[in-house]
Image (cartoon, rainbow, N blue to C red):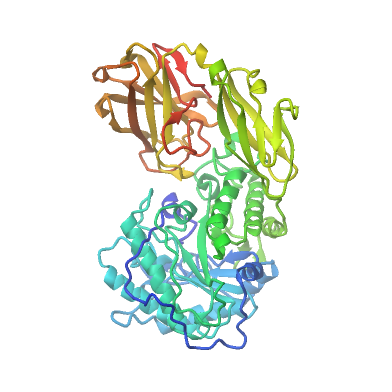
Amino acid sequence: MVSKFKSFLYFLLAFVFMFTTVISCSSSQVQAASSLTSDFTQLNATQFVSAMGAGWNLGNQLEAAIDGTPSETAWGNPTITQGLIQKVKEAGFNTIRIPVSYLSKIGSAPSYTIDAAWLARIKEVVDYAYNQDMYVIINIHGDGYHSITGGWLLCDSNDQTTIKSKYQKVWQQIANTFADYDEHLIFESMNEEFDGTYGTPNTAYYSNLNDYNQIFVDTVRQTGGNNSARWLLIPGWNTNIDYTAGNYGFVIPTDAYRSSAIPSTEKRIMISAHYYSPWDFCGDNSTQITQWGAAATDTSRVSTWGQEDYMESQIKLMYDKFVTQGYPVVIGEYGTIDKTSADSTNTIYRQAFAEALSAYCKNYGCVPVIWDNGYNGTYGFGLFNRSELAVTQQGIIDAVMEGMNTVIPPNSAISPTEATFDKSTSGQADIAVTMTLEGNTLSAIKNGTTALAAGTDYTVSGSTATILKSYLAKQQIGLTTLTFDFSAGKDTVLTVNILDSSDQSGDFKIQEFNAGTAATVNTLNPKLKLVNTGTTPIELTKVKIRYYYTIDNEKEQSFTCDWSTVGAGNIIGTFVKMSTAKTGADYYLEISFGSGAGSLAAGQSAEIQIRINKTDWSNYTQTEDYSFNGASTTYVDWSKITAYQSGNLTWGIEP
């Protein structure tokens, strides 16, 4: 991380890797011959995460640089002292992450020798924490940034042979320097590595990133000693959770050279990710988004996304993908900048954010490591005054520690969470809901504050609750929200779209699915199908279709029709800002048809594949959007997209 005193550009980005390796290893497992020192304690994943506790970043120090030359005082912080690290330890942190840049401190090929004085200073700072029995993470930090002078670890460079050779030599020297340190020292391969552009990772560049991680693991392990068994920390594309846990190309390195002393059932690889969502609250000092969470008092100061539910879903995503497979997760950076100059209550919400993040990490088996750039006040992530060795944000520190002591009850889940009920006689059917109870019990199902009657309005058999058609038929046309109240954890909601197909004034319907379903995307990609269900042709110039969503930061937008059965050139997209924002919608895209589209014959359909993006390619959070369909991979009837004929609503339900 260059600095959290930086623009949005440094933060989001992506992660990339696949596989192409400069160092080959045999497919059979090779075990390091070197023995471990007597003080090296073998901890399994659960024990190790527990021992690491809450972590703190010594940010903007050993990774700071001017014109490609690292210097711990280059970005305005004082020389690091033992006293500072003692103060961090006293505050309750048991892990310290020390970002390190090398840049011009690396000599020329072929040896790529690291400057001896710089390596000695890194060791000295590591010892400040290591000698206090703190867990210490060191990495190669700023060398992978395009925006840093001298950056060389570039996954999109054409000269990967040179980069991989240099990377291997640098890690070999670092690993040899610390080979006898016990399990308290953790190596992290790199930091926020990506190609400098936003959006879906480039698979070729992601492959290079995967190669770096594999080279890192092989190189460290082959230096022997305690390095053959220590925990190694691996990031995905730009340490982005979606691009690491999702199907974008991340590959966990093989560990063929690890010590034979490690039980075969255990891992020694951890996964790294960062969390700064929503960025307009966490890091963008130019906005007036100063509050966060359910306790916020001014909705105009709260981001349209990224609240508690989203935070939990992101941490759980890492848990489901990696922790359950024996790979611990380190949230190596998270935090919020000081915006008290814009809102005197800002610190309250910074504390709430820190407590929630650390609590979710604790409950999902992850290690939270808060970012501190040493700055207090505007743009500041600082928790300490490094010159005076004083705590400046005791409330945030207390919140982190409180979160680490919080036990969050497991949440039950239901499937589906959205359903459609047709009140027409031929279309009526009960709605069966599968419950994943997670040890809880169903207490009630409520429509607003009114509880449904068990046995009359719904039935329960094992883990299936069935909402009876006799109850649904009595509900008004529109959305009916049914809350499943469980004995512990969060309640879950089933939204039922009540319609009456026999009373539809039009002769068509809209089917839809979303091509991309990641929570955070820089492009909305709905695929639509207009189906003529009547017996006469429909003149398409009289039809308009609306897709509802939230813009998530006001920016100029662009519309593209990639393909349509009536011709992409005949599809017109218009962005409309809603006069009154609704749940899940403050904008809609209105699609209309040019004269060349002609008519849609009875029984025929028109497919429309479109894209929506902001011209600066900043992200949308689409999972809360009204018209988003994250459950389907093929066309299904979708009433959350509306259609109009000659100005009259003929399909769907407006938000």
The residue at 44%/53% (across/down) is 243
Q: How many marks?
A: 0
Please tell me which residue lies in front, 337 or 169.
Answer: 169
Q: Quadrant of residue 563?
A: top left
Confirm whether residue 146 shows in the render.
no
- Rendering coords of residue 530 (x, y %): 37, 23
Tell me if residue 148 comes above or below residue 348 in the rendering: below
Asked if residue 330 lies left or right of residue 213, the reply is: right
- Rendering coords of residue 392 (x, y %): 65, 60
- Rendering coords of residue 210 (x, y %): 39, 64
Tell me if residue 337 comes above or below residue 325 in the rendering: above
Asked if residue 314 lies left or right of residue 176, the reply is: right
Please tell me which residue lies in front, 336 or 74.
Answer: 336
- Rendering coords of residue 226 (x, y %): 53, 83
Confirm whether residue 494 shows in the render.
yes
The residue at 51%/64% (across/down) is 271
